[in-house]
Image: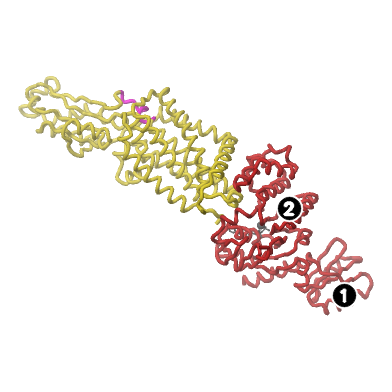
Chain colours: A red, B yellow
Amino acid sequence: MTDAPAITVTGLTKRYGGRAVVDHFDLQVPRGAIYGFLGPNGSGKTTTIRMMCGLLTPDAGKGSCLGFDILTEQARIKERVGYMTQKFSLYEDLTIRENLDFIARMFGVRDRRNRVRAALDDLGLADRATQYAGTLSGGWKQRLALAACMIHDPELLLLDEPTAGVDPKARRDFWDEIRKLSARGVTVLVSTHYMDEAIQCDFIAYIAYGKKLISGVAREIPEMIGLYTYRVTGNDISALEARLRQEEAVAQVARFGAVLHVSGTDKAALDALAARYGKDGSHRWERKEAELEEAFIYLMGGAADNFAGAAS
Amino acid sequence: MRLRFSLGRFLAVLSKEFVQMRRDRVTFVMMIGVPIMQLLIFGYAIDSDPRHLPTLVEMGDEGPITRSILAEMETSSYFDFQGVVTGPAAGDRVLRDGTANFVVVIPPDFERDILRGLSPDILLAADASDPTAVGGAAGAMTAIVNNAIAASMTGPLAASTAGPAPFGVVVHRAYNPEGDTSINIVPGLLGVILSMTMVMITAVAIVRERERGTMETLIATPVRPLEVMTGKIAPYVLVGYVQTLVFILAARLLFGVPFTGSTLAFFVGFNLYIVVNLSLGFLISTVARSQMQAMQISFFTLLPTILLSGFMFPFAAMPGWAQAIGTVIPATHFLRLIRKVMLKGAGLADITGNLTAIALILLVVVAVAIRRYRQTLD
Ligand SMILES: Nc1ncnc2c1ncn2[C@@H]1O[C@H](COP(=O)(O)OP(=O)(O)OP(=O)(O)O)[C@@H](O)[C@H]1O
Ligand SMILES: [Mg+2]
């Protein structure tokens, strides 16, 4: 049972007005995994997730979700999946309790009353249960939506930017909860723009302009890209940054406060460059492991070029 | 298996819809307020002077004077002769089912009686349940008669024109003896009010889910299209009941409109009519992208309902193309039905034709709506 992947899709394609916003997308999500789904705005994450749970019909491609065909067995999939939309889409003119209760009824949840009360307690909203959902703050709306999509104990969670606008404490709680669910065998596919969330995932897929650029075990991603990085500290970082950008060997310079991360794909050339710049002693050059963050900034730059090439 | 209908989910959608309806105060007030306003406006303000009304003749006699009178009636452009009827029973029937607005009865020995100076009467039987149709025409009769006398009373007959009129006209107004406009327009108004509110409310209620994005959450659950459709429509059937009740009371108290027919016929008729309008609203919701569009399209369907259904202008007097359009509008059939039931004392057996017509329209609308309804976001 745990051997079969929770999600398998191949060649998934969706076109809007002739433009392929998701283009031959392949993905395998193992059961019980936390799978991070990353990509810049408009890259097709939401569209892909919608196709996986039967909310959109793909123009091409096929796949299965929890063993059910995404093209013909959407009804079965929906019963077992918890989908949290990117935009808040519960009823603003219903109260918090009414919303949870309605969703629970849609899924035919057993012992509904207690389940809803438990969800309210977990949320810490028990004393505000009769407040209209529309009057909640942005972060609280997200948390309510999350509670709603988990009320029927789904086997698979599809979460579209669940923590957008959520404060750090609540985000930590959220990820604790996700890990607990994952340990119990629930599969989680979560899209996010936050790097600190990406590193919490077991697997990561990166999509840009509708095409999947890379996917695999999270910590292997930088290595897969083949990125080497130096950490540079010292005086007058800004001037150095400008000069480094002109260098052939440097694929990317990312600035974090007073620190520069200088990356390139050609190890020998980068080492030579580090030796040359390090000589004058005004900056400290240290080798470091390339991290996901650099990897993704690098990917984003590359994807733009790809797309420009494809468009011309 | 996949088409299994879940009562639980249906009831959940239904009660959610009720709660939302109750909280949307403005719409709620509109649903009750608009019918009353319309009742007052249309009931008190509308009048018109239609022509070319279908007329049949019962020829008890024939001769130059008769021909002259009929020719004069035709010239007046109020009457449009479409044939003859034989006997009073046939005359009553055509008036009752609305084939003709008038039956002109020329009594036997009419010509001879004139010559003998007996001053016989022509009977103009009118279906006065639509007084706007009848009023102008009946009023024009005096002039028509005078012209006919002038034209035909020549030669040896001229002498008799000097004395009292050689013959008279008796207008018999069936179904609405006082010719009270509101009596006819008020039952028809129920058709217009129900159509307007039912279509618009359902269309908007469904499009609202899509516009606010809640549709995405809704269809990500296992809920089936039929459960959504019925669950969202059912609460508005009740609204239709409330409107009808308000309407019947107002019609009785304000305009003294009688209710002469069968309650069962009325009940069956207005239920079917409510359902057909709700389905139409559902159909519109599959086309419209925003609540604004839903409203505009609903409003657009209201125009033919008012203008081509026989509500504003007598159906029989409309040109062929307008009648063709009118025939596919549910309101046309409901109007005939409701006038028959409220004013002409009809029972269930008398309205089966109208019910069948509405049911056919319902069938087509539902078929198209279900085909168009998508359980995805495409
Ligand atoms: N219904 C639609 N009609 C036309 N274009 C659409 C539609 N839905 C999405 N798109 C386009 O598809 C592309 C991908 O959109 P999608 O919402 O999947 O991106 P995303 O990766 O979720 O972005 P974000 O990070 O901003 O949420 C975008 O360019 C968007 O404009
Ligand atoms: Mg998105």
Quadrant of the image containing the C terminus of chain B: bottom right
Q: Residues within 10 Å of mark 2 (few under 14, many from 20)?
A: many
Instruction: Give the side of residue A264 with respect to residue B96, left or right.
Output: right
Circle 2 SS class: loop
Q: Residues within 10 Å of mark 1 (few under 14, many from 20)?
A: some
Depicted B149 relative to depicted B196: above or below = above
Residue assigned mark 1: A274
> What type of secondary structure mainly makes up the magenta span?
helix
Residue furthest to the left: B156
Q: Residue B352: x and y, percent?
A: 32, 38
Magenta stretch, residue numbers: B178-186
Q: Amino acid at mark 2?
A: Thr
Q: Amino acid at mark 1?
A: Ala
**Within the displayed image, which quadrant is ligand 2 positioned in?**
bottom right
Q: Is residue B180 magenta?
A: yes
* Residue A312 in view of the camera: yes
Q: Residue A87: x and y, percent?
A: 66, 51
Q: What is the tally of numbered marks visible in this picture?
A: 2
Circle 1 SS class: helix
Residue assigned mark 2: A163
Depicted A66 relative to depicted B126: above or below = below
